[in-house]
Amino acid sequence: MSALVAPAATATAPTPATVAGRVTQARVIRAEWTKLRALRSTRWCGLTAIVLIVGLAAAIGGSGTPYTVSAANSAAAGMSIALLGVLFAQLVLGVLGVLAFSGEYGTGMIRATLAVVPSRLPVLWAKLIVLVGLVLPLSLLATVAGFFTATALESARGGSAISLADPGVLRTVAGASLYLTVVVLIGLALGALLRKTAAGLAAFVGLFFVVPVVVGPSRTRSPDSRPTCRPTPAAHCGATR
């Protein structure tokens, strides 16, 4: 007895063609922005920085003797005191900057990143751009909110009504935002150089909190009465007249 065996169908469904696009700086920036948004630490660090700046501005503006602008107490100096939260927010944003690079070495994701983008320079530029794009508007929003919160509370308690048009006030508010942006970029550089989160954080704390104490006060007077400022806190140097 013979059996007829039908030939097995060997045709397979064609696999869809994948076209890999050219690696461009714009695509690297988009990828780094996606990674930064996916991190929970990004949201927590940003929220904590806002709370520190606005919360301390409210606490300072609502307590103590109301601030009165005079020849000895300028409006900019008053805002420099109200934005004391910037000094604490710099630690939080410095952690964010360090983690932006060292975190990838800790999780091993850097291997996948460098497999797609073999050169480290485009990755570094992309991380720098996305961090500036995040921290600059975020910190500016926080310092402006802290300014209005502190001035509203001071005015309600009988203090001077300080506005952004007063001499040096806008420079102090904007300078605090720029200072925090520079801080997060320094954290990024430390994370890229040391590649270890613990080492990067230790170097950051030493640079911003230990060195200024060891070297001396952050503000000194030169013979011509113009301030000579040290790196920390840079945001408050512009307020001295």
Image (cartoon, rainbow, N blue to C red):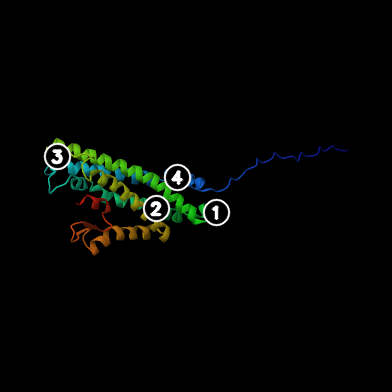
Quote the CA–CA distance across marks 2 and 3: 42 Å
The one nearer the camera, 221 or 106, is 221
N-terminal-most mark, 4 or 3: 4
Q: Amino acid at mark 3?
A: Ser
Work out which quarter of the rendered image holds the N terminus and state it: top right
The reply to whether discs 1 and 4 touch (Cβ–Cβ < 8 Å) is: no
Q: Residues within 10 Å of mark 4 (few under 14, many from 20)?
A: some
Please identify, in this view, whether the residue under mark 4 or under mark 3 is nearer the observer: 3
Q: Amino acid at mark 1?
A: Ala
Q: Residues within 10 Å of mark 2 (few under 14, many from 20)?
A: many
Residue topped by disc 4: 33
The mark found on residue 115 in the picture is 1
Quote the CA–CA distance across marks 1 and 4: 18 Å
Q: Indicate the secondary structure of the residue bearing disc 4.
A: helix
Provide residue 48's location: percent of width, then percent of height: 30, 45
Provide residue 58's location: percent of width, then percent of height: 21, 41
Q: Quadrant of residue 216?
A: bottom left
Q: Indicate the secondary structure of the residue bearing disc 3.
A: loop
Q: Residues within 10 Å of mark 1 (few under 14, many from 20)?
A: few
Quote the CA–CA distance across marks 4 and 3: 43 Å
Quote the CA–CA distance across marks 4 and 2: 14 Å
Quote the CA–CA distance across marks 1 and 2: 20 Å
Q: Amino acid at mark 4?
A: Trp
The reply to whether discs 1 and 2 touch (Cβ–Cβ < 8 Å) is: no
N-terminal-most mark, 2 or 3: 2
Q: Indicate the secondary structure of the residue bearing disc 1.
A: helix
